Image: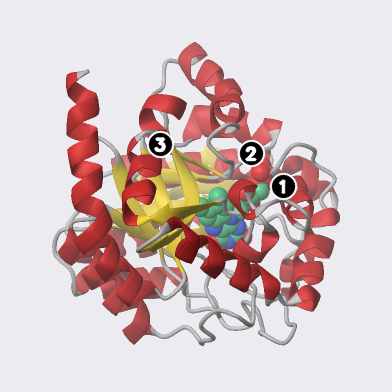
Amino acid sequence: MSLKLGVFLPNGQNGYIISENAPQYEPTFEHCLAIAQEAETIGLDFVLSMIKYHGFGGKTGYWDGCLDSVALATGIAALTSRIDVFATVPVLGIPPVIAARQLATFDEIAKGRGGVNLVTGWNRPEYEPMGLWPGDKYYERRYDYAAEYVQILRGLWRDGRVTFKGEFFDIDDATCFPSSGRELPIVTAGQSTKGQVYTAHYGDYNFVFGDRDLLPTITKPMLEEAEKVGRTVRTYALFTIIAAETDEEALAKTEYIVSGQDTVALQNVAGSAALDPQTGGTSAHFVQGLTAPAEEGNLTFMSFPVIHGSYESVAEQIATLQRDTGVAGVLMTFVDYVPDIKVFGERVLPLIHEKLAALATV
Ligand SMILES: Cc1cc2nc3c(=O)[nH]c(=O)nc-3n(C[C@H](O)[C@H](O)[C@H](O)COP(=O)(O)O)c2cc1C
């Protein structure tokens, strides 16, 4: 199947839903592993875990707990055999030479199925308490910092050693052996103008928020820049999946979750995002998410647009995404992960396959 489908692992407390009317849970390895194994069983392509060092509180304690992403991904990689596994690395938190080695070890355990979601960190209240916030100029400079970071990573993976003199890093013959020579695929997720340019130059996969109408416009600047520099970067879109027997049932479930939204945690997410002066990026999207309809990305679902409907309708909406928006893949979140993924495999995925095959012959 040319459309790649993956699961965003809920390794932060309560996953990607900020509502009292959704399952409440602390993240555990057991849960995330069960999700990854179910995703592998039904034939999905990848799982990705996130990292958050400071949560958003409220009644739901949203993201107040979070499992370390690289350790988690490594454990999952050891206990799966086919599915690709992406770990998230925060460029402010881990020096690049150390991260390169951690990720190379993870990739060895994953037998070449490893990848990395490299995040710049948009959130001062997350990094300041740890003494890791470099000052508010970082909002402007974070992609310049990440650009140097990613060159060091790639150099170490490719050659096993690197010397790099930049504005932010001064590395003199650092090594990363043993070296498989494999450069791990890099996910980036910047939607701001600078984020798009950075992604075009350094990313392999561009993960974006946006409903199906907005997706082509959102990804256009990145694709144009990538073409200019002769790189191929694939766009993956984020969606929350709420599928049921009927459209009405799925809509009711979606509305029920929104009606139980944790307003304190939502305000904390939006307040944190509002500190970011970058325009047109994720932070602005989060603030807009306070009032956006679920289908366009309400903040109750971390501003991931919700694809809801009957199994047939959800399959149709997913299968036509590539044709209508040009995305190469979808990163999905679920309400009750393990059972929902199982049902997705039984009721939705076969229909997606059928519909994609039919579209391919048109
Ligand atoms: C799929 C996806 C995963 C992300 N994972 C993380 C994460 O684990 N930790 C984090 O701090 N930011 C994460 N982010 C945020 C992005 O890395 C990025 O900082 C954010 O989108 C702001 O970039 P922008 O202002 O250029 O849009 C994620 C974003 C997306 C779309």
Left or right: 250 in relation to 294: left
Q: Is residue 152 visible?
A: no
- Identify which residue is drawn at 61% across, 41% down: 190
Where, by quadrant of the figure, is residue 231 drawn?
Answer: top left
- For badge 1, the amino acid type reads His
Q: CA distance from mark 1 to mark 3?
A: 23 Å
Q: Is mark 2 within 8 Å of ligand 1?
A: yes
Q: Are marks 1 and 2 in contact (CB under 8 Å)?
A: yes
Where residue 285 is drawn, which disc sits there? 1
Q: Amino acid at mark 3?
A: Asp
With respect to residue 225, does 272 lie above or below?
below
Q: Position of residue 258 (x, y in %)?
A: 66, 68
When the figure is inspected, residue 171 is found, relative to residue 95, above or below; the finding is above
Disc 3, SS? loop
Between 133 and 356, which is closer to the camera in this rendering?
A: 356
Pointer 2 local density, CA inside 10 Å: few below 14, some 14–19, many at least 20: many
Image side of residue 234 versus residue 113, left or right: right
Asked whether mark 1 and ligand 1 are closer than 8 Å, the reply comes as yes
x, y percent for residue 209? 58, 45
Distance in Å between CA atoms under marks 1 and 2? 9 Å
SS of the residue at dot 1? helix
Badge 1 or badge 2: first in the primary sequence: 2
Q: Position of residue 102 (x, y in %)?
A: 37, 65
Name the amino acid type tagged 2: Gln
Residue at 29% from the left image edge and 43% from the top image edge:
4
Which element carries disc 2, helix, strand or loop?
A: loop
- Hey, which quadrant is residue 232 in on the image? top left
Residue bearing the label numbered 3: 204
Q: Residue furthest top?
A: 228
Label 3 neighbourhood size at 10 Å, few (<14), some (14-19), many (20+)?
A: some
Residue 33 appearing in the image: yes
